[in-house]
Image (cartoon, grey):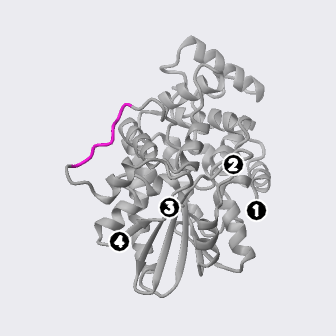
């Protein structure tokens, strides 16, 4: 199921609800089937970093990789145990046109694997998404609390385009509205899951008759989105303010910068960006990254007990930084090597 089919299913399933609410669902699901690694968290400007990478006196493998320069290609890791091999590839779930990222190194690793593993098992199947409208609203009005007069007028402008009013949306949770505004900006920039790494590799796996699987059910992803909608931190208003600033040209969108960082394999920039995200929203960071990574590592260890090769594809943020899958595997004694071009 491609993004167009997902959009159509959501629109049919939520017929009768305000159009902007349906488009928020589309933004959260079709725009990022699994929660987008770098953009579900509030985007940060990786060109202006305030949180440095703290390096110990004796650097670990993670720290050495973090201070190294860009590799020139998306990052790939390899871990072996006996006859088993697991490749770990950090993806971007939605990309704009013209981004070339597949090289001979990735072709060889992917095409010789026995199985491909993703964040969810079936990217071409989308179960019914229920309950979002109820969870998107809070008990009391509070959407505009903390917004300036300019930001309120900008929000009114967007809602009017969808035949809605600020009064009708006043109980919408700020984090949900921020996702809606962010989706509009992403769509305007040409970002689409049809061009995303996960969708392309999933289709390639199907064409090669590879076994496919996933770490989490679609239900689990919905639960994450519900939690984000409630606003795991008090950062929902801050996220909405930034989303409005980007959409109306008062701030620049860091999505293109982040794609370039991923595309060039700049692990240091990605590590520093994640440190900023953790400092800005520790609860969301734990919800989207740390806690999920901890649940995935035992599944990877099961893969390493066999005799097959598995190619794992997940958002790039899951493989970067001190709370990453890579760091957790190394802490458990596995040797994880980065496979550079």
* Mark 3, residue position: 340
Whether residue 55 is in magenta: the answer is yes
Image vertical order of residue 223 relative to residue 81, above or below: above
For the residue pair 192 and 59, the one nearer the viewer reads as 59
Q: Nearer the viewer, mark 3 or mark 1?
A: 3
Q: Nearer the viewer, mark 3 or mark 2?
A: 3
To which quarter of the image does residue 103 belong? Answer: bottom right
* Mark 1, residue position: 1
Compare marks 4 and 2 and give the one earlier in the sequence. 2
Compare marks 3 and 2 and give the one earlier in the sequence. 2
Q: Is residue 39 visible?
A: no
Mark pair 3, 4: CA separation: 16 Å
For the residue pair 290 and 137, the one nearer the viewer reads as 290
CB atoms of marks 3 and 1 within 8 Å: no
CB atoms of marks 4 and 2 within 8 Å: no
Mark pair 3, 2: CA separation: 19 Å
Q: Residue at x 34, y 72 (%)?
A: 334
Q: Give how far across and how far down residue 324 sits, in percent.
A: 39, 57
To which quarter of the image does residue 159 belong? Answer: top right
Q: Nearer the viewer, mark 1 or mark 4?
A: 4
* Mark 2, residue position: 99
Residue 43 got which mark? none
Q: Residue at x 45, y 42 (%)?
A: 269
Label 4 SS: loop
Q: Give how far across and how far down residue 117 sits, in percent.
A: 57, 71
Mark pair 2, 1: CA separation: 22 Å
Image vertical order of residue 303 relative to residue 193, above or below: below
Q: How many marks?
A: 4
Which quarter shows the N terminus?
Answer: bottom right
* Mark 4, residue position: 335
Residues shaded magenta: 50-56
């Amino acid at each position: 199921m491609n993004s167009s089919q997902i959009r159509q299913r959501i629109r049919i399933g939520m017929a009768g609800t305000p159009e902007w609410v349906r488009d928020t669902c589309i933004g959260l699901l079709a725009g990022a089937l699994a929660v987008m690694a770098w953009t579900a968290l509030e985007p940060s400007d990786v060109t202006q970093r305030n949180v440095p990478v703290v390096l110990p006196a004796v650097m670990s493998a993670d720290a050495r990789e973090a201070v190294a320069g860009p590799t020139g290609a998306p990052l790939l890791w390899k871990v072996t145990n006996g006859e088993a091999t697991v490749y770990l590839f950090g993806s971007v779930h939605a990309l704009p046109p013209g981004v070339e990222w597949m090289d001979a190194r990735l072709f060889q690793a992917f095409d010789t694997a026995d199985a491909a593993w993703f964040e969810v098992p079936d990217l071409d199947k989308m179960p019914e998404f229920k309950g979002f409208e109820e969870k998107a609203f809070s008990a009391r009005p509070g959407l505009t609390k903390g917004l300036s007069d300019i930001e309120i007028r900008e929000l009114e402008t967007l809602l009017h385009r969808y035949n809605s009013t600020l009064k009708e949306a006043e109980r919408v949770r700020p984090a949900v509205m921020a996702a809606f505004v962010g989706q509009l900006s992403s769509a305007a920039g040409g970002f689409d899951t049809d061009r995303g790494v996960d969708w392309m590799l999933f289709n390639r796996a199907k064409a090669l008759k590879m076994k496919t699987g996933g770490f989490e059910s679609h239900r689990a992803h919905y639960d994450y989105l519900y939690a984000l909608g409630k606003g795991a931190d008090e950062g929902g208003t801050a996220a909405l303010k930034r989303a409005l600033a980007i959409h109306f040209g008062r701030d620049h969108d860091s999505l293109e910068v982040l794609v370039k960082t991923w595309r060039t394999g700049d692990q240091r920039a990605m590590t520093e960006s994640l440190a900023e995200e953790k400092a800005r929203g520790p609860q969301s960071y734990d919800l989207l990254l740390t806690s999920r990574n901890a649940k995935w590592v035992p599944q990877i260890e099961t893969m390493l007990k066999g005799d097959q090769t598995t190619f794992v594809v997940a958002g790039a943020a899951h493989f970067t930084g001190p709370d990453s899958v890579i760091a957790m595997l190394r802490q458990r004694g596995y040797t994880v090597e980065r496979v550079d071009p």
